[in-house]
Image (cartoon, rainbow, N blue to C red):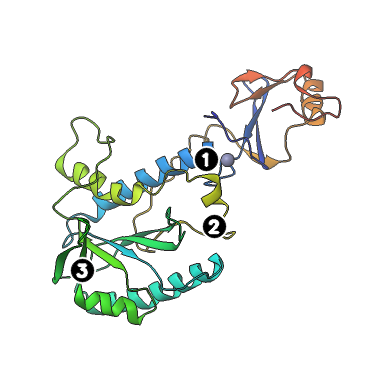
Amino acid sequence: MDDYCKNYSVALYATDSEQDRLLFSRARCGMWSCEYCASVNRKQWFKRMAEGLKAIGDVDGWAFWTLTHDLDNAPYIEQRRTLSNAWNKLIGHIKYRSDHEIYYIRAIEIGARATRRMHMHVLINFVPDDIVRIDRVDGTHYHKSEFWFSRAEKTGFGRIADITDVSGTYTYKEPEIALGSDLETTRAVLTASYIAKYMTKTDADTESRFPPRTRRFNTSRNFPKLADEEGFTRHEWSRGEKMNEGIASNAWRHKMHVYDLQREENITIDNFDDSGQYID
Ligand SMILES: [Zn+2]
């Protein structure tokens, strides 16, 4: 596990006048395919979801919807478009039928089975009142709402769906509940964990199937946002090119040290290769 992003393309620089240092930091690439960034993304998303759910508070319960499509052998870009169009229509119906404000978080996933079908998981504060459990002959089961199954199909989703009320029963758990948490926090964390389990880094094969610019995780626009808590406030940061010998030499000429914030050490001439590139 890397302890910083190795895929960075943007560097951040600041001057620490007290210690005469040029501070160098890497901007994260933020991609889910990057091991380091995936772990940071996951933590940030989880925090945002749990705090958001807590802020939203008690709202008629939460349901976990799994939605697919019926396309066969369609390119992923088309699968994504189909899911996204169907969702835009379905959420319109849901809002129309709901007597309260609707919040949701959704995740796009590519199935692990042979079909590798793209599908969607949605955590939403809309629990249909006609959910029934259907037991399959193979011992597995799913939850069905006759009304919303037919709505989902009409808006372009596939025949297979699942709508589970997750307000009261916590079948999926993550060991991330801090000791001494109050009931609301515990409830928010457990509810968030339904989506969070899809936030682990997928294998490289699956990752490469996501079309460029696929937003794998998404929330409704009204979903509470975290207050900006970047710890970068002590210094004025500016964006620049990647660290190289020219940048370091210029700082050295001004009697400054050049400090790598991720490696937590001063950069020396030995850290550059023959072409002046920083050895990362
Ligand atoms: Zn990264």
Q: Amino acid at mark 3?
A: Lys
Q: Is residue 241 left or right of residue 148?
A: right
Mark 1 and ligand 1: say if the CB distance to the nearest ligand atom is below 8 Å.
yes
For residue 210, the mark is: 2
Give the number of the mark in front: 2 or 1: 2
Quarter of the figure that contains the C terminus: top right
Residue 159, position as x, y percentages in the image: 32, 74
Q: Is residue 29 left or right of residue 61?
A: right
Q: Quick one: label 1, few (<14), some, or many (20+) residues within 10 Å?
A: many
Residue 6, position as x, y percentages in the image: 62, 35
Structural distance between the alpha carbons of marks 2 and 1: 17 Å
Quadrant for ligand 1 reads top right
Q: Which quarter of the figure has residue 150?
A: bottom left
Q: Are marks 2 and 3 in contact (CB under 8 Å)?
A: no
The residue wearing badge 3 is 144
Q: Which structural element holds mark 3?
A: strand
